[in-house]
């Protein structure tokens, strides 16, 4: 394809992806409220639209029209920049995530992915690691002790768990010597002995890695049980205590976008991406993988919410101890074992 | 062409960040401008084909080291640095020195390296090859650096551990 | 197509900025960041040279530099914290007991 | 081939003794110390006897190389030992007399402090002396030479708490240095011209050279310098001054070192290098003149001395003078002969004197003695023999050797002979004077019971509280213990018969001693055939003309007569009417005073050398160079350093950024340099 078509296609893909992602974020919020409500034996949002399906829209409107107040004594430039940083980096990582094989329109083969770089995974890691800045700066710039503590906790916690996160992924990378997410997914096609899908999670003891990744990811996204940075009971609302209206919404979006990214990465790396039974007419053949993929993501999100509804919060020292003294060694052990497996197989 | 444009763009960003680092009087701004420098440097690396280096640059430098800096700045709640006589003197000598030095070095470099050019991704430093080199030709340095890192961790723990926990050490 | 020398000049400028920052900054942390800036400049020159001579060793070197920089950052920041604990300041001009 | 005699053992044994005593003696009981000392010196003596017994089977000179010592370019010096008739004689004398004196010392020093120290030194001296005697090259000889100097220094200053003793030790050492200086220069000359110091090589190098008649040459220079060294060691004019003072040391030391052995080292050295002297008539003349003057000079001083040991000391000097006369006239064997006999009777004299002093409790002034004849008979009789021997009364040992020397001296020049003769007369006079004053007349000493207090040796402070094994503690003049008497007797016998091995042909003897030494002085003398009649005639064992015998007999008679004359004079003055001497002394007046004060030589030296030297050192070396140059340099540099650092110190402001600035500046300089280099 020539440059112009490439640009056009890319723009379209980007816009589409962004739209889908933001909608997904909105409806993840709705889903969470609903599920938690049911877990807590409530109804959750019901008023707006059927099953409160329009609730996210209402929330969005509310956020838009709320007064955007900036408390005094904040360090303004960063106070304003922080939420943008957070949301930008949260949304960026979607760029390298493939959601399925390519679709063919006319004679134009369009991979269902904004761009396929051969170090996609690294880019995701880098971007998410940059996401820390949003939180930290927000906490610091809003010049309030709750925020500061929240920001400190957030940055410390994210740095700490990032190591375990990265290490847990290395096993998979060793199994499929590539950083390209597409390659990784393709490597998982097929089955063992005909009936077990050839997913990495069943592959060379990557189940542990999967567990580590999930835990670390929860910490990275500041979700219960690791939501110390915004622990309501002690820090009011942590790093975004001083934020309101759209800025607050940005943090909100960033968090859920991160959740989705994490879910996507997990399913790509461990659960065989979009692989699944494919049948029917060509268009359906093209779109079924996407459906499988979205299904997995939905499953992850559901687990997220489920966990939130069930588990209590850690204490901060417990969090750190868990991260450094349990997860990290475990990840290293998994790394060594996997290396041995790979070496033996080679 | 695009190559040159991108290079100039991010090069300018680099220089802007660096200069900003100098002129900003609040450490956190300096830190953020340094992050900018590092990010754009990563892009430059990509242009040179060192993709893995670029990724690591972002993850390690921007994502870890600079976060540490920001963390410390937040922890110590460092404020703006005040002007002093010494600083003015330093300005007086430092700025022109920097200018002269950079101009001289730049001229010299241009002079020396002539007009040899590189195309985008001239030397693809794919993770595979990099890793292969790292674990074959550079195994010993690699291990040594690992030991160095270990020592650094210990040192950091000892230094930053709270005073009353190592009271005796301070007395001695 | 970009001349190698451009990259080198860029790295030189970064390095010079780092030196200047080291000279004119008063805040220990800023000075430390200036050092990081210098390191980055050097890294760029490494990569550029690697491209020039078609030798990946240059990029390998960058990794070592990064590792060392990380270690240095850890220790250095720890030192800064210790200094702050004892001296209650981050201004290097006031931390000047190391003399006759 | 000649058997290996392990000559090296002979010097090393005493060294071991010295080491043992010196290192551990402090802890030993006295018996053990004495045992060690006697054991090792005795062993050395026994070995020497063994060597002597097997000597006939050796091809002389017999050289044994122990190890290579120095190898520098062509020059090489070994630890090698050289045995020929000459060194054999010296060996026997040194070990024998040394052993006897060791025995004697045990008794004499028994209640002294530092007993072990004494014997350690004594053994050390034996070691060095034997090294000197047995050395096969000048360098090793020089080591021994210096070593005996050291030992004598240590022993003279044995009672170092006594200022006079310490001073005497220093004096001896320094005066010896002067002589050694000459010796060293001689050695350097030899090295320069012959590239070696081994005796045989040097002599072979010299052998072809003719005699340096008339104008002085290399050999003359070497000879004269060697003579300077010899003068230092053997107390000849002008370097004799240390010997009388050396009497501060314990008497056995005086006997061993300053009478029997060490002081004769010079004679030995001259005799050893006779090859050189035979070819350097001028040097010979110097030797002869020095010897003659010394002999007379010292003898005259001896007349007036009242300290018994001083008298003996001066007599030693004059006897050494005799030996040098002999060397000077080329009668080396005669010199060695006299050396041997002198070792016997002078050692005996000293020991006997020591016994006397011991008996009267440390009194050394003859005027405090007298009438000891009956109280200490053994000492008296042995001393008598010794006195007769030195006085040259036949048939005592001294007669033969001295007569030999006089005869040879006459053959060289009647002047030597006449002075020698007069000296002989003087010698016998002052010896008999000593004899009479000590043993005859009434006892003039202080109350006998209280001689502990009047301990002139002045070492009461060092006396150890052990009860004396013999009756020294409880008053009364008494004979010395057997330990001291036995050596006396042995030496007495030796000094009686010692001379008979060298009865000259004139007296119907056949001078076996000279025959025995013949090879040494012949083998090489042949090279210098005829440059001096006396030598060939003397050395040549060939038939001496009857006329020669006749004249020799006459001269013998004259010398005997001189000796008797001295005896009679002494008898007159100091036995018949003891008041006369004072009157004569008064009559002589100034001359007497001069002689009494040893011709004011010490004062002269003090005025000439010592004072200027001290003044010069103080002014130039001390204040001038040391303080104003060396110290000043140090101080100024230190001050400069302080100034500089004071100014530079401010660079170290402790301000981090200033340091950074310096670093940056340095880097800038380096970069600039590199750019400059690159652009060129």
Image (cartoon, coloured by chain):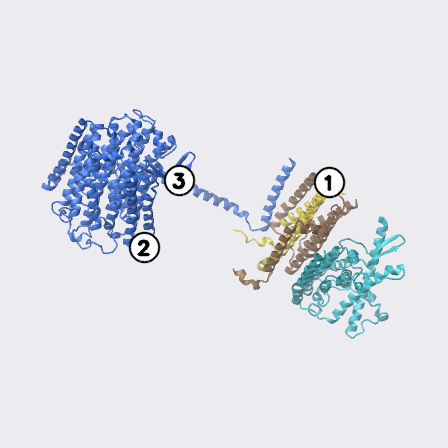
The residue under label 1 is B116
Chain that is coloured blue in the picture: D
Looking at the image, residue A237 lies above or below residue D280:
below
Eye-nearest disc, 2 or 3: 3
Contact? badges 2 and 3 (CB < 8 Å)? no
Instruction: State left or right for residue D94 relative to residue D205.
Output: left
Q: Secondary structure at mark 3?
A: strand
Q: Are marks 1 and 2 on the same chain?
A: no
The residue most toward the left is: D576
Eye-nearest disc, 1 or 2: 2
Q: Which mark is residue D27?
A: 2
User: Hue of chain A?
Assistant: cyan
Chain that is coloured yellow in the picture: C
Looking at the image, residue A47 lies above or below residue B157:
below
Q: CA distance from mark 1 to mark 2?
A: 91 Å
How far from the left and from the top, in percent, is residue D251?
A: 23, 46
Where residue B29 sits, quadrant-wise, is bottom right
Where residue A25 sits, quadrant-wise, is bottom right
């Amino acid at each position: 394809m020539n440059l112009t078509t490439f640009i056009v296609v890319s723009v379209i893909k980007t816009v589409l992806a962004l739209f889908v992602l933001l909608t997904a974020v909105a409806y993840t919020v709705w889903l969470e409220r609903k599920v938690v409500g049911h877990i807590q034996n409530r109804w959750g949002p019901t008023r707006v639209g059927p099953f409160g399906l329009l609730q996210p829209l209402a929330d969005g409107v509310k956020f838009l029209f709320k007064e955007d107040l900036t408390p005094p004594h904040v360090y303004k430039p960063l106070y304003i920049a922080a939420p943008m940083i957070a949301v930008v980096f949260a949304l960026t990582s979607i760029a390298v995530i493939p959601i399925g094989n390519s679709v063919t329109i006319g004679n134009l083969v369009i991979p269902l992915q904004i761009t396929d770089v051969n170090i996609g995974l690294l880019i995701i890691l880098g971007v998410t690691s940059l996401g820390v800045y949003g939180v930290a700066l927000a906490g610091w710039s809003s010049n309030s002790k709750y925020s500061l503590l929240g920001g400190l906790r957030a940055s410390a916690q994210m740095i700490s768990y990032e190591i375990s996160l990265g290490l847990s992924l290395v096993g998979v990378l060793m199994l499929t010597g590539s950083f390209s997410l597409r390659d990784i997914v393709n490597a998982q096609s097929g089955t063992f002995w005909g009936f077990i899908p050839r997913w990495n999670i069943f592959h060379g003891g990557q189940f542990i890695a999967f567990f580590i990744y999930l835990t670390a990811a929860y910490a990275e996204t500041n979700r219960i049980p690791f939501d110390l940075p915004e622990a309501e009971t002690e820090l009011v609302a942590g790093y975004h205590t001083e934020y309101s209206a759209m800025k607050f919404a940005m943090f909100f979006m960033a968090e859920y976008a991160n959740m989705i990214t994490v879910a996507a990465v997990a399913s790509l790396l461990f659960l065989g991406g979009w692989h699944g039974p494919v049948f029917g007419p060509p268009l359906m053949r093209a779109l079924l993988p996407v459906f499988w993929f979205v299904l997995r993501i939905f499953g992850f999100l559901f687990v997220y919410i489920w966990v939130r509804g069930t588990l209590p919060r850690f204490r901060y020292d417990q969090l750190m101890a868990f991260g450094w003294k349990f997860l990290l060694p475990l990840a290293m052990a998994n790394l060594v074992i996997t290396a041995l497996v790979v070496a033996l197989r080679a | 062409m695009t190559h040159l444009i991108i290079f100039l763009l991010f090069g300018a960003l680099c220089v802007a960040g660096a200069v900003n680092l100098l002129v900003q009087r609040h450490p956190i701004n300096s830190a953020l401008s340094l992050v900018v420098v590092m990010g754009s440097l990563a892009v430059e690396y990509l242009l040179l084909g060192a993709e893995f280096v670029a990724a690591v640059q972002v993850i390690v430098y921007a994502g870890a080291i600079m976060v540490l800096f920001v963390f410390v700045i937040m922890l110590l709640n460092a404020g703006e640095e005040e002007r002093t006589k010494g600083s003015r003197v330093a300005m007086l000598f430092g700025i022109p020195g920097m200018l002269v030095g950079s101009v001289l070095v730049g001229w010299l470099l241009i002079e020396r390296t002539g007009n040899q050019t590189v195309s985008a991704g001239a030397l693809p430093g794919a993770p595979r090859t990099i890793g292969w080199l790292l674990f074959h030709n550079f195994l010993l340095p690699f291990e040594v650096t690992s030991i160095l890192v270990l020592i650094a961790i210990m040192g950091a723990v000892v230094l930053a551990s709270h005073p009353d926990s190592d009271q005796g050490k301070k007395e001695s | 197509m970009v001349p190698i020398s451009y990259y080198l000049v860029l790295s030189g400028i970064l390095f010079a900025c780092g030196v200047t920052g080291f000279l004119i900054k008063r805040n220990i942390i800023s000075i430390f960041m200036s050092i990081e800036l210098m390191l980055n400049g050097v890294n760029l020159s490494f990569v550029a040279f690697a491209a020039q001579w078609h030798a990946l060793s240059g990029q390998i070197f960058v990794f070592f530099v990064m590792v060392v920089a990380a270690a240095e950052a850890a220790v250095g920041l720890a030192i800064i914290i210790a200094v702050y604990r004892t001296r209650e300041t981050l201004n290097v001009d006031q931390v000047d007991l190391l003399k006759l | 081939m000649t058997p290996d005699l392990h000559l090296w053992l002979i010097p090393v044994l005493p060294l071991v003794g010295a080491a043992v005593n010196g290192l551990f003696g402090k802890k030993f009981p006295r018996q053990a110390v004495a045992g060690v000392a006697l054991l090792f010196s005795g062993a050395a003596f026994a070995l020497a006897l063994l060597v002597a017994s097997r000597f006939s089977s050796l091809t002389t000179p017999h050289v044994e190389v122990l190890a290579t010592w120095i190898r520098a370019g062509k020059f090489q010096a070994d630890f090698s030992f050289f045995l020929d008739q000459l060194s054999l004689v010296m060996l026997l004398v040194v070990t024998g007399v040394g052993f006897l004196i060791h025995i004697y010392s045990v008794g004499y020093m028994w209640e002294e402090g530092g007993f072990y120290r004494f014997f350690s030194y004594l053994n050390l001296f034996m070691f060095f002396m034997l090294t000197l005697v047995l050395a096969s090259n000048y360098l090793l000889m020089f080591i021994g030479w210096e070593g005996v100097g050291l030992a004598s220094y240590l022993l003279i200053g044995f009672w170092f708490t006594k200022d006079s003793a310490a001073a005497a030790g220093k004096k001896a050492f320094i005066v010896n240095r002067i002589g050694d200086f000459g010796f060293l220069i001689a050695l350097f000359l030899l090295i320069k011209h012959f590239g070696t110091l081994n005796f045989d090589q040097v002599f072979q190098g010299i052998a072809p050279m003719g005699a340096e008649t008339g104008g002085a040459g290399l050999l003359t220079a070497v000879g004269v310098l060697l003579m300077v060294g010899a003068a230092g060691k053997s107390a000849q004019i002008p370097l004799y001054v240390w010997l009388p003072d050396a009497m501060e040391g314990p008497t056995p030391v005086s006997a061993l070192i300053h009478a029997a052995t060490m002081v004769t080292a010079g004679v030995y050295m001259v005799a050893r290098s006779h090859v050189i002297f035979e070819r350097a008539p001028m040097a010979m003349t110097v030797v002869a003149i020095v010897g003659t003057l010394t002999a007379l000079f010292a003898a005259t001083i001896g007349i007036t001395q009242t300290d018994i040991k001083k008298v003996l000391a001066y007599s030693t000097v004059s006897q050494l003078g005799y030996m040098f006369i002999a060397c000077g006239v080329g009668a080396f064997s005669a010199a060695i002969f006299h050396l041997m006999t002198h070792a016997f009777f002078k050692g005996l004299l000293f020991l006997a004197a020591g016994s006397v002093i011991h008996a009267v409790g440390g009194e050394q002034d003859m005027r405090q003695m007298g009438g000891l004849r009956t109280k200490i008979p053994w000492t008296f009789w042995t001393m008598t023999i010794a006195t007769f021997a030195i006085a040259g009364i036949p048939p005592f040992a001294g007669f033969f050797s001295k007569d030999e020397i006089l005869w040879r001296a006459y053959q060289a020049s009647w002047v030597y002979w006449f002075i020698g003769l007069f000296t002989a007369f003087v010698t016998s006079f002052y010896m008999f004077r000593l004899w009479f004053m000590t043993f005859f007349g009434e006892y003039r000493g202080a109350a006998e019971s209280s001689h502990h207090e009047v301990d002139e040796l002045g070492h009461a402070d060092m006396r150890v509280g052990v009860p004396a094994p013999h009756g020294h503690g409880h008053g009364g003049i008494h004979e010395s213990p057997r330990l001291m008497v036995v050596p006396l007797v042995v030496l007495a016998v030796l000094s009686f018969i010692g001379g008979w091995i060298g009865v000259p042909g004139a007296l119907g003897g056949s001078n076996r001693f000279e025959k025995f030494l013949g090879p040494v002085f012949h083998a090489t003398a042949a090279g210098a055939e005829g440059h001096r009649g006396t030598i060939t005639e003397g050395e040549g064992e060939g038939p001496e003309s009857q006329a020669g015998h006749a004249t020799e007999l006459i001269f013998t008679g004259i010398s005997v007569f001189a000796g008797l004359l001295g005896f009679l004079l002494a008898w007159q003055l100091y036995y018949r009417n003891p008041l006369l001497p004072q009157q004569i002394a008064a009559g002589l007046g100034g001359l007497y005073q001069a002689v009494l004060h040893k011709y004011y030589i010490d004062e002269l030296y003090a005025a000439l050398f010592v004072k200027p030297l001290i003044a010069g050192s103080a002014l130039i070396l001390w204040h001038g160079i040391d303080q104003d140059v060396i110290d000043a340099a140090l101080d100024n540099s230190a001050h400069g350093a302080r100034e500089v650092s004071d100014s530079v110190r401010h660079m170290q402001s402790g301000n981090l950024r200033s340091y950074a600035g310096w670093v940056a500046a340095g880097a800038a300089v380096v970069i600039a340099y590199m750019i400059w280099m690159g652009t060129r």
